[in-house]
């Protein structure tokens, strides 16, 4: 047997006190007057023996009570065979996983409630003089310090479910950072979690001196259905048309999920979409038609019903519908009547013609598509502006003039980079293939007929055809040459025609089945689609148009939702503003972007990370194998190891302790003393 605080054994010297009391109190004599002294000697001898026995038992009771009180303070224990118990104050760090997966049920309570109970039992297993760190997935600043036992218990009680998710290696690093800041010699780390596969990166813990106790908790049933993601089929949403929203619903369980009901709420109006059966460990993509009747920002919410994991049953989204699509046509001479007719035939498009000699470069960002109509040359200034325009998300369609300056076009196209024109050939060629898998011609022809009339040209430019340019052919000649090619540049696209638009060399403008939908889709095409939703916790940048600063003040943008409002990180570059959310955002939902007290300029949707949707835990055997391969010293505590978890932890870390039994002994001997003095009369 050993003592945790052997210095208290000095107090055993206090055992002299009961002896002194015994010598001076019980030796006092009292005068007793008797009328008859016939049996005085016999009574005196009998009473003296009984008094001596009682006084001796009282003395022993007091000695044992005081001795066991000293032992209780010294805390005797018998160490475990495989443990070395250190003496003195300890620093104990306890991580409680409060991510969404911990809301799953374990028998009649959630995993989080069970984790909080285990954390309280661990805290109580240590001395009130020890220091504690309570850490959660939120990594809050107030959890980065050591506190007393009472404060630790209070922190555990305040823990609530959070969208944050942390890997085990990051948890350990944060624990060590706080423990090393303390002054105590012994440091202990506990991690209480469901240990899903996506967070259990024990192999990334490289500190061989680390000692960690992990307590895995698992739910009764691993079952969850979530809305994984959603996206529009087309990159641009149009008014007065049916826009198709694709929704991916995933079943993370091991059984078929039947009749999962999907509904949508769009601009305040809810309607059911339908039901679906989702096989185990699979996903289903459903289509949701949305008819848009107004321009501006739209807010939406997709919902399914699932229990008990519900954080991923909603998917918020937002999108913008422009009042019109602006198109700029740059001409050397007179505008092309076919282009005018094609764009002005669709009210949604607003076309502007400008001469190549009087361009307003500052207005380029206002256009979605810029068409170069048979220009003989491209100036260096125009080339630079077009390159910037495409990189920022614009689209450029190039029709060269038959007498084009090859060198100017070469300098212009090499900046993207794209294939360059090499020489003009007067030869008749026919288009033989349309790339219907690319967005420009995708779903344009419902039933492709063999007699579909395709464009033909009387002359065209040879193209350099460098494969490293990353080109994608949209219209291909019968001999395999490219007539219309697309290049993805930055966030936009460059469309390059091998033939002029003039009817002297091409009948493309007379082929309305191809020409009109091609212009229409090129105008709304986007290499980088506007995101309809963002994920909380991910390092994502929000991009929107910057507002004009008319008051001369510093621009301060604010994001405001139903429950919270905050100022994001902001950076203004040219006509764009880039916002970073960081850790400020906690609640999912729709957030409007405000500048001072103006009306919202943009709307963004945020959803919780679906990383916690997959409830696939590490089985105990697999967890043991992974732990065994880790460089750190990790011990697994089973939640069923002991009913009295406090005593179990105490014995595991301090050996078999006896201080409680010492206190019981103190009370027992004090009670014995009281009984002797009260009921043993002499």
Image (cartoon, grey):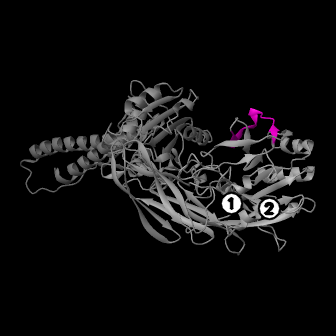
Compared to residue 638, the image places residue 142 above or below, namely below
Across and down, in percent, residue 558 comes to 68, 66
Q: Residue at x 47, y 40 (%)?
A: 191
Compared to residue 174, the image places residue 1 above or below, namely above
Mark 2 vs 1, N-terminal side: 2
Along the line of sight, the residue nearer the viewer: 452 or 138: 452
Residue 468 drawn in magenta = yes
521 on left or right of 23 = right
Across and down, in percent, residue 610 comes to 50, 49
Residue 158 in view here:
no
460 on left or right of 637 = right
Q: Which residue is drawn at 59% across and 42% down?
A: 174
Q: Is the magenta stretch mostly helix, strand or loop?
A: strand
Compared to residue 658, the image places residue 507 above or below, namely below
Residue 269 in view here:
yes
Across and down, in percent, residue 442 comes to 59, 50
> Which corner quadrant holds the N terminus?
top left
Across and down, in percent, residue 242 comes to 54, 63
Along the line of sight, the residue nearer the viewer: 255 or 409: 409
Say what secondary structure mark 1 lies in.
Answer: loop
User: Based on the displayed image, in which of its 4 quarters is residue 167 positioned?
Assistant: top right
Compared to residue 433, the image places residue 507 above or below, namely below
Residue 339 drawn in magenta = no
Q: Give the range drawn in magenta.
A: 460-477
Q: Mark 2 points at which residue?
A: 328
As measured in the structure, the alpha-carbon distance from the residue carrying label 2 to the one carrying label 1 is 35 Å
Q: Which residue is drawn at 46% across and 55% down?
A: 311
180 on left or right of 620 = right
Q: Mark 1 points at which residue?
A: 568
């Amino acid at each position: 047997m050993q003592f945790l605080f052997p210095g208290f054994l000095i107090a055993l010297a206090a055992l002299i006190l009961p002896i002194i009391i015994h010598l001076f109190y019980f030796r006092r004599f009292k005068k007793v007057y008797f009328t008859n002294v016939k049996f005085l000697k016999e009574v005196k001898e009998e009473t003296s023996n009984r008094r001596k026995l009682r006084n001796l038992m009282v003395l022993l009771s007091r000695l044992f009570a005081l001795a066991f009180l000293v032992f209780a303070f010294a805390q005797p224990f018998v160490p475990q065979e495989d443990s070395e118990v250190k003496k003195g104050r300890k620093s104990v760090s306890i991580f409680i996983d409060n991510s969404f997966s911990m809301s799953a049920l374990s028998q009649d309570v959630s995993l989080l409630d069970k984790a909080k109970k285990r954390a309280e039992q661990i805290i109580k297993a240590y001395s009130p003089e020890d220091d504690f760190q309570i850490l959660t997935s939120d990594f809050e600043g107030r959890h980065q310090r050591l506190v007393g036992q009472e404060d630790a218990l209070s922190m555990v009680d305040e823990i609530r479910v959070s969208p944050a998710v942390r890997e085990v290696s990051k948890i350990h690093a944060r624990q060590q950072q706080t423990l090393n800041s303390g002054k105590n010699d012994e440091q202990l780390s506990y991690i209480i979690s469901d240990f899903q596969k996506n967070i259990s990166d024990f192999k990334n813990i490289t500190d061989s001196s680390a000692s960690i106790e992990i307590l895995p908790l698992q739910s009764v049933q691993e079952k969850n259905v979530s809305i994984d993601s959603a996206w529009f089929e087309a990159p641009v949403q149009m008014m007065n048309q049916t826009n198709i929203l694709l929704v991916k619903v995933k079943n993370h369980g091991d059984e078929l999920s039947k009749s999962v009901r999907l509904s949508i709420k769009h601009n305040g109006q809810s309607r059911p979409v339908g039901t679906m059966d989702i096989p185990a460990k699979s996903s289903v993509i459903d289509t949701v038609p949305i008819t848009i009747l107004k321009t501006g920002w739209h807010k939406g919410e997709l919902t399914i019903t699932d229990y008990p994991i519900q954080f991923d049953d909603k998917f918020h989204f937002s999108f913008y519908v422009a009042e019109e699509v602006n198109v700029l046509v740059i001409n050397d001479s007179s505008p092309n009547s076919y282009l005018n007719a094609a764009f002005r035939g669709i009210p949604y498009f607003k076309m502007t013609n400008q001469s190549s000699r009087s361009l307003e470069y500052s207005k380029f960002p206002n256009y979605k598509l810029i068409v170069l109509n048979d220009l003989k040359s491209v100036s260096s200034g125009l080339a630079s502006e077009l390159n910037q325009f495409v990189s920022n998300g614009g689209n450029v369609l190039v029709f060269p003039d038959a007498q084009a300056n090859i060198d100017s076009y070469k300098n212009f196209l090499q900046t993207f980079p794209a294939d360059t024109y090499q020489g003009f050939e007067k030869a008749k060629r026919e288009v033989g293939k349309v790339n219907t898998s690319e967005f420009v011609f995708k779903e344009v022809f419902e039933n492709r007929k063999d007699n579909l009339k395709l464009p033909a040209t009387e002359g065209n430019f040879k193209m350099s055809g460098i494969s490293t340019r990353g080109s994608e052919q949209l219209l291909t000649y019968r001999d395999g040459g490219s007539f219309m090619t697309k290049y993805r540049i930055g966030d936009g696209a460059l469309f390059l025609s091998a033939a002029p638009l003039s009817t002297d060399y091409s009948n493309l403008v007379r082929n309305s089945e191809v020409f009109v939908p091609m212009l229409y889709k090129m105008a709304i095409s986007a290499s980088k689609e506007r995101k309809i939703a963002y994920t909380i916790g991910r390092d994502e940048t929000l991009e929107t148009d910057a507002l004009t600063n008319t008051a001369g003040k510093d621009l301060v943008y604010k994001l405001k939702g139903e429950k919270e409002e905050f100022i994001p990180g902001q950076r203004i570059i040219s006509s764009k503003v880039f916002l970073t959310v960081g850790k400020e955002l906690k609640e999912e939902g729709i957030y409007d972007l405000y500048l001072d007290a103006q009306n919202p300029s943009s709307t963004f949707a945020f959803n919780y990370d679906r990383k916690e949707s997959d409830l696939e835990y590490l089985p105990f055997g697999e967890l043991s194998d992974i732990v065994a391969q880790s460089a750190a010293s990790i011990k697994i505590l089973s939640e069923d190891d002991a009913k009295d978890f406090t005593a179990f932890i105490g014995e595991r870390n301090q050996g078999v302790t006896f201080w409680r039994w010492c206190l019981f002994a103190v009370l027992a001997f004090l009670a014995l003393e009281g009984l002797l003095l009260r009921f043993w009369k002499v």
